[in-house]
Image (tube, rainbow, N blue to C red):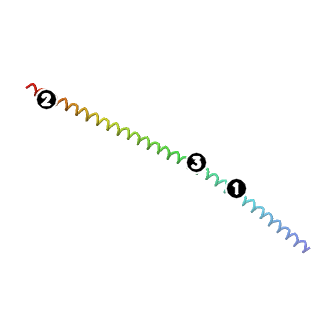
Amino acid sequence: MLFLDTYFHIQFKQTCEQLVHGERFRLEQEYKLKVNELNNKWQEQLEKEKQTLREEFNNLLTNIDQKHHIHEVSEENEKELLRRMKKEAEDALVRQWQAANERLAKV
């Protein structure tokens, strides 16, 4: 009888160890699966965030280029306006000198 008790005890112990080992293996596999799922999810979020930041950066560069171009155009327009004003002032001065010389010639 003692032999049977020892035998069943050993069988019970081995069965429990097998169940524990199987459950540990299942939990480890489930853990690895969850870790991989989370890593993939975080990687996807990271890639989306990188893409969003890249698009925002490109938009900012485009805006800077547009503003730079507008500034260049404004600067060119300003220079052209100054050239025209200078020419008009010089032309007016020439006309005034001519008119003054004509009046002096009549005197």
Label 1 sits on residue? 33
Is residue 83 found left or right of 50 in the rendered image? left
Outermost residue on the front side: it is 105
Q: Nearer the viewer, mark 3 or mark 2?
A: 2
Q: Residues within 10 Å of mark 3 (few under 14, many from 20)?
A: few
Residue at 15%, 27% (x, y): give it: 99
Q: CA distance from mark 3 to mark 2?
A: 79 Å
Q: Position of residue 72 (x, y in %)?
A: 38, 40
Whether 58 is drawn above or below 82: the answer is: below
Q: Nearer the viewer, mark 3 or mark 1?
A: 3
Is residue 42 found left or right of 13 in the rendered image? left
Whether 2 is drawn above or below 106: the answer is: below
Mark number, residue 48: 3
Q: Secondary structure at mark 1?
A: helix
Residue at 21%, 31% (x, y): give it: 92
Q: Position of residue 84 (x, y in %)?
A: 28, 33
For the image, the number of numbered tags is: 3
Whether 45 is drawn above or below 29: the answer is: above
Q: Amino acid at mark 2?
A: Asn
Q: Residues within 10 Å of mark 1 (few under 14, many from 20)?
A: few
Q: Secondary structure at mark 3?
A: helix
Q: Position of residue 98 (x, y in %)?
A: 16, 29
Image quadrant where one finds the N terminus? bottom right
Image quadrant where one finds the C terminus? top left
Disc 3 or 2, which lies upstream in sequence?
A: 3
Disc 1 or 2, which lies upstream in sequence?
A: 1
Mark number, residue 101: 2
Residue at 83%, 68% (x, y): give it: 14
Q: Amino acid at mark 1?
A: Leu
